[in-house]
Every structure is written in C-alpha cells, then in structure tokens.
Image (cartoon, helix red, strand yellow):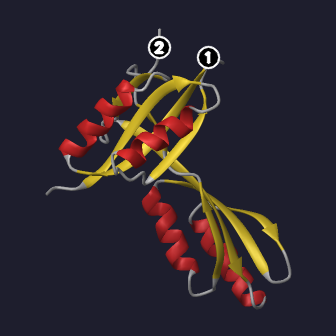
Amino acid sequence: MDEKSHIIAAIVEHKPGVLYSVANMFRRRNFNIESISVGPTEKNDLARMTITVNGDEKLVEQVIKQMNKLIDVIKVSRLDPTNIVSREMALVKITTHDAKARSDIINYADIFRARVVDVSSETLMAEITGGSDKIDAFIDLMRPFGVKEVARTGITALSRGAKSVRIE
C-alpha cells in the first residue's frame, strides 16, 4: 500500500457545527486527520478548511466523496502537491539554562528565519513559519536544549497561479 500525505481543501459554510460534522464524518469512517486549519475566506459566509490526511489513493477518494455528501460542504478538492504553496506556523518554547544556551538558540532561530517572540529568565519562545520539514528540523535542533512546549497550526495551502478552490 502506497501511503502518503494528501492535502484536501474544502469550502464550507461559515457557521457553527460545520467543523463538528466534518470531524464526525472522519470519526465515523475511521479516517485520521493529520492536520486541519480552518478560517474565513474572502466571502464572509464561507470558510476554508485545509485538511491533511495520510493514506493511499483509495482512502483520499473516499474522504472526498464522503465530504461532498455533507450538506454544509460547498466544494472539495485535492491539492496537487507539485503546484501549491503550503505553510505551517509553530510556537516553540525552549529551556534556556544560561546565556550561552540563549545565544545559541537565538543564532539557530536566525538561521531558520524564526522570530523570538518571548523571553523569560528560564525560557525563550520562537515563532517559525514554513514547510513541515523545516519546522520539524528546527524542533529537532532545539531538543538538546529542552523543548518545553510546542503549538503547531497545521498546514494551510493554496494552489499556485490562476487555479483556485472557490465559488464564483
């Protein structure tokens, strides 16, 4: 079985209960959501869901078919991984035992184009945006210092060029 990561974009009604019905459909069908991000679109009454799932072609086709059956889902598309811009954001809280560790963390953050957004006597918090691989690499590099906490947004993505997932 050829399992890989797939990114699905859905335009849904922007109202209470829609996220619940989508998540409930995933639960009922025993599909796993790797990441999900949801936010309003350029139209006030619509929201965009970007959902990442791992699986084979058959699984992703089933996910799309099942999502299309939901009343509040307007449009569902699988994004072509070779023709998208995708990003994720993470906040990473790292232990800083001394000035040398703090300096090293700040230098590494600079290399990864992360921003230091909070500093205390015992911790430093960095905000990093980019691909999942970049964020994973940064977190792995921070582990020897002591990663206290991580919060990640999940992937959000748009197709490149004129192609879009939207309602005209």
Q: Residue at x 86, y 82 (%)?
A: 121
Judged from the image, the secondary structure of the residue bearing numbered disc 1 is: loop
Residue 62 higher or lower than 89, as above or below: above
Q: Which residue is mark 2?
A: 167
Considering every residue shown, the one lying at the far left of the view is: 1
Q: Residue at x 66, y 18 (%)?
A: 44
Out of 128 and 70, give the one closest to the viewer: 70
Considering every residue shown, the one lying at the far right of the view is: 121
Out of 149 and 13, give the one closest to the viewer: 13
Q: Which residue is mark 1?
A: 43
Count of labels in the image: 2
- The CA distance from mark 2 to mark 1 is 9 Å
- Asked if disc 2 and disc 1 are in contact, CB closer than 8 Å, the reply is yes
| Picture quadrant of residue 16 | top right
Q: Residue at x 58, y 78 (%)?
A: 142
Circle 1 packing at 10 Å, graded few (<14), some (14-19), many (20+), is few
Q: Residue at x 72, y 89 (%)?
A: 100
Considering every residue shown, the one lying at the far front of the view is: 28
What's the amino acid at mark 2? Answer: Ile
Residue 19 higher or lower than 28, as above or below: above
